[in-house]
Image (spheres, rainbow, N blue to C red):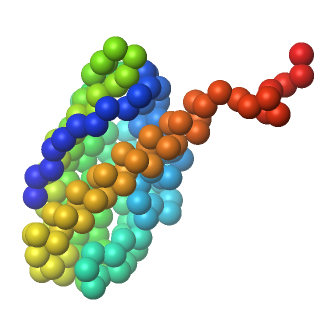
Amino acid sequence: MELSGSTIVPYPRDVVWQSLFDAETMRRSISGCTELEWISENELQGKIKKKFGPIKATFPLNLSVSDVVQFESYTMQGSSKGGSFGYVNGEARFNLVDIDEDCEFFYEAEVKMGGKLAQIGSRLMSSAAKKIVGDFFEALLAEIESQNSPETDEEKEPD
């Protein structure tokens, strides 16, 4: 299955980039992700709980980052094996482009799956994948907004 698209994020590219490399921000942005941490300079591990049709399971998540061009682009490979439920492997290329004061986030991904996950059917999996991507961007934007919103009067330190 192939996915591609883009979205405009109303923040500067460096702010978006930093969020993409912050494990806690990413954990909160990935639907169903219960754990995510950097285990080396270019590897993350975590767990994700998902339901695809009749299948509901917790999957270990292994991600690696390569081809990094700071503040511009990177490639992420991922794999997860859910025992008898099957597996998901994928690779995605991400590009960030300045548009005035905003950032356009482009992605292209190829995902392969096997086992019961593949038996569900490509139409159901394709619509689930599109929803996951949409939910990710919505949650990532909320995370960026909460981390970069101006302080209210109560939150400001006294002079």
Residue 67, above or below 31: above
- Say which residue appears at 28% left-offset and 59% top-offset: 131
Number of numbered markers: 0
Q: Position of residue 46 (x, y in %)?
A: 44, 58
State which quadrant residue 135 falls in: bottom left
Q: Is residue 144 left or right of residue 51?
A: right
Residue 154 can be seen, yes or no: yes
- Say which residue appears at 44% left-offset and 49% top-offset: 139
Q: Is residue 55 left or right of residue 138?
A: left
Q: Position of residue 60 (x, y in %)?
A: 38, 66
Q: Position of residue 100 (x, y in %)?
A: 34, 14
Q: Residue furthest front?
A: 153
Instruction: Name the residue nearer the viewer: 69 or 94.
Output: 94
Residue 19, above or below 44: above
Q: Position of residue 42 (x, y in %)?
A: 37, 38
Residue 44 can be seen, yes or no: no
Which part of the image, by quadrant, shows the N terminus? bottom left
Instruction: Name the residue nearer the viewer: 28 or 98.
Output: 98
- Say which residue appears at 23% left-offset and 37% top-offset: 6
Instruction: Name the residue nearer the viewer: 71 or 147.
Output: 147
- Say which residue appears at 52% left-offset and 42% top-offset: 143
Which part of the image, by quadrant, shows the C terminus? top right
